[in-house]
Amino acid sequence: MLKLRLSRGGTKKRPVYKVVVADSRFARDGRFIEKVGFFNPLLPKEKKERVGLEAERIKYWLGQGAQPTTRVARILGENELMPMPANGNNPNKAVPKKERNKKEEDNKEAPKSRSSSSSRSS
């Protein structure tokens, strides 16, 4: 499966990423098919040098079935090359845990009675 993903470059604690098209089985920083852009997270968001993308090539690879990773999808959405992905923030996700804790407390208050009716014959 083809992926549009980030390949890390730069030095220690100073990352610079290439946006590449690669087979999902290839190593993150290893072999890739084509470089289609770059991303420098150290620059401020308003600087145009922060992200550089080859729009035509990205559209071509998306048409060929390449799937962007979540981070690349956000970068492409910010640059209007594809629809912005939905935000993964779900504030209601923790609600069932409270209910689960309440059920555990109820189970502790009413312990199960053990039946000794099972007998083993030899």
Image (cartoon, helix red, strand yellow):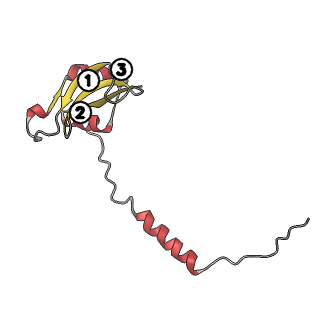
Q: Quadrant of the N terminus?
A: top left
**Percent x, y for residue 77?**
23, 36
Q: Quadrant of the C terminus?
A: bottom right
Q: CA distance from mark 1 to mark 3?
A: 10 Å
**Image spot of residue 114 (x, y percent):** 72, 76
Q: Residue furthest right?
A: 122
Name the quadrant containing residue 47: top left
The amino acid pointed to by label 2 is Leu
Query: Which residue occupies the extreme front position in the image?
Result: 12
Q: Which residue is mark 1?
A: 58
Could you say whether the residue bearing mark 3 is in a helix, strand or loop? loop
The residue sitting at 43% across, 69% down in the picture is 98
Residue 85 in view here? yes
Mark 3 neighbour class, 10 Å CA radius: few under 14, some 14 to 19, many 20 or more? few
Q: Position of residue 42 (x, y in %)?
A: 14, 40
Marks 2 and 1, the one that precedes in the sequence: 1
Q: Which mark is residue 45?
A: none
Residue shown at 29% from the left, 47% from the top: 87
Q: Are marks 2 and 1 in contact (CB under 8 Å)?
A: yes
Q: Considering the numbered disc 1 on the image, is that residue within a helix, a strand or a loop?
A: helix
Amino acid of disc 1: Ile
Q: Which disc is residue 64 wearing?
A: 3
In the picture of the structure, the residue carrying the numbered disc 2 is 76
Q: Amino acid at mark 3?
A: Gln
Q: In terms of secondary structure, where does tag 2 sit?
A: helix
**Other residues around mark 1 within 10 Å, as few (<14) / some (14–19) / many (≥20):** many
Residue 49 relative to residue 117: left or right:
left
